Amino acid sequence: MELVLIAIGLSMDAFAVALCKGLCMKKIRYGQATVIALFFGGFQTLMPLLGWLLGKQFADSIAEVDHWVSFALLAYIGGKMIWESFHSKEDESCDIDKLDIKELLLMAIATSIDALAVGITLAFMKTAILPAVLEIGAITFAISFLGVLIGHQFGTRLKRGAEIAGGAVLILIGLKILLEHLGILG
């Protein structure tokens, strides 16, 4: 369940961008929605794997404080998401007759940087990485695809709420990891 919540939290940036992409579609294009979701889901699969590989290099040497590192990373990522929801500028460019692959690549990387840090956390938690990253990627794919569809219907009114909810989920998971490790939660 924790992994599902982490995946949902991580996918909120991609969801917000997908909402905006859907808003820009005069007519819903399922092929474009699929390509957008594949980019976001693919990078949300790749980045935690890279983070996990990095984390595995030094996980044993900091096992005494890994719960603090996990908490700090998740709290930072969640706090950053919440802060950005109040301080980001709305994207005024809104023409999606043709997908700009370079722009989509940059957005996929930008929305998955947080997943790199979460991958480091997964190394500390001794998580089976392949099922974890596939689950994160699949959830992000589905949420991004839905984001395009919802964006087409409702616009950017949901963007801020999605980012705040995703950030809060990540902070709460980090707090839970810390409290369990300290023996406060069973």
Image: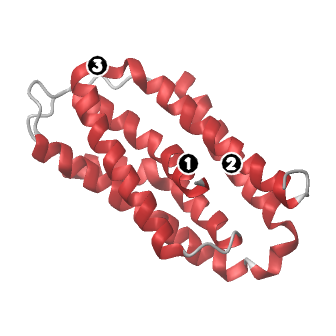
Disc ID at residue 155: none
Is 33 placed left or right of 3 in the picture?
left
| Disc 2 and disc 1 in contact, CB within 8 angstroms | yes
SS label for mark 2: helix
Where the N terminus falls, by quadrant? bottom right
Q: Quadrant of residue 181?
A: bottom right
Q: Where is residue 178 in the image (x, y as percent from the top left)?
A: 81, 54
Residue type (three-letter) at the residue carrying disc 3: Phe
Q: Where is residue 125 in the image (x, y as percent from the top left)?
A: 69, 69
Disc 3 packing (10 Å; few <14; some 14–19; many ≥20): some
The residue pinned by badge 2 equals 173
- Residue depicted at 67% across the width and 50% down the height: 74
Q: In which quarter of the image is residue 172?
A: top right
The residue pinned by badge 1 equals 5
| Disc 2 and disc 3 in contact, CB within 8 angstroms | no
The residue pinned by badge 3 equals 154
